[in-house]
Image (tube, helix red, strand yellow):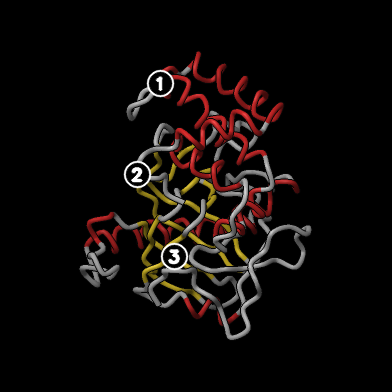
Amino acid sequence: MLPPPKGVDKERDWVRRSLGERYDTAAALVARVLSQSPGLAGGPRGSTADALTDLAAIRLYLSGSTPDIDAAIRSAVAGPHVPLARCATAGMRRLPSYRGGAILRATLSDAERAWYQEGRLVTEHSFLAALSALRRGLPGNTDVLFWSMTARRTGLLAPEIPDRLLFTPGTRFKVLRSVDGDRPAVLLRELAASEVDEAGNLREERVPLDEIALKGLDQLHALWKQAEQDTEVPAGDPLPDEHADAFRSAPGLLQSHPDRPAGPRPPAASNGPRPQKGQNQ
């Protein structure tokens, strides 16, 4: 879902013309944000109008049915989500970045959890939402923790969830550890482009940053488990029901959740977990 080499001018025109009142509402919110944080209009080449459209696309994505949009992107389905997602991807470069630990909680089968073998390279082809702060009561059966390098903070555009982070489509991760037991977990580190060669393979199996990230994620996971049992440990409230599903997607897999409302969904896997198209296996 990366923007085309020639830019997203056609996609911006489509978003402005086709989304009607929804776009106008999002653009009005973004205009207020830009008046308070004019630096967001800087960044790569382009006018303030382009920045307004790209950031409005992010707001529209965040306020819509994000699991359905993500499922359509991961399945390479054509549709109106494509120009919206391309503009949103362009706009994410304007948002502040986040470095450090991030969390989500997914529902994984035993086979899906086993797929996250230590050292595996995982590519997420859609947006991936995570949280920068601990939250109690997230739905799912597996903790997924990330060491982020470039995730974007979206609180300016969606203040209803100030701790939400977004990874851009195409972000690559390395599995550092998979944990079984009473509270299963998968620990991953975001990779820099320089860590992957032209064939899509890791240049080095182990680097010093792996140990640094793993130490931080182990500490975060221990604190998260403690917060679930002890209300004295600082942690946020459970997510509102309408947003909970946005933080359940495991990176690199095509999944469908039976408890979600009907919408665009990828076909269910028949022989274990399905890595996304182009995914290293």
Q: Residue at x 45, y 52 (%)?
A: 169
Tell me which corner region of the image, top left, top right, bottom left or bottom right, holds residue 26: top right
| CA neighbours of label 3 inside 10 A, class few (<14), some (14 to 19), many (20+) | many
Image vertical order of residue 144 relative to residue 84, above or below: below
Q: Amino acid at mark 2?
A: Pro
Circle 2 SS class: loop
Circle 1 SS class: loop
Q: Earlier in the sequence, mark 2 or mark 1?
A: 2
Q: Earlier in the sequence, mark 3 or mark 2?
A: 2
Q: Position of residue 136 (x, y in %)?
A: 65, 52
| CA neighbours of label 1 inside 10 A, class few (<14), some (14 to 19), many (20+) | few
Residues at circles 3 and 2 in contact by the CB criterion of under 8 Å: no
Q: Earlier in the sequence, mark 3 or mark 1?
A: 1
**How far, Cα to Cα, is label 2 from label 1?**
18 Å
Q: Nearer the viewer, residue 139 or 183?
A: 139
Image vertical order of residue 1 relative to residue 277, above or below: above
Q: Residue at x 53, y 50 (%)?
A: 130
- Residue 106 left/right relative to 116: right
| Residue under numbered circle 2 | 5
Q: Position of residue 162 (x, y in %)?
A: 57, 35
| Residue under numbered circle 1 | 47
Circle 3 SS class: strand
| CA neighbours of label 2 inside 10 A, class few (<14), some (14 to 19), many (20+) | few
Q: Position of residue 196 (x, y in %)?
A: 26, 63
| Residue under numbered circle 3 | 187
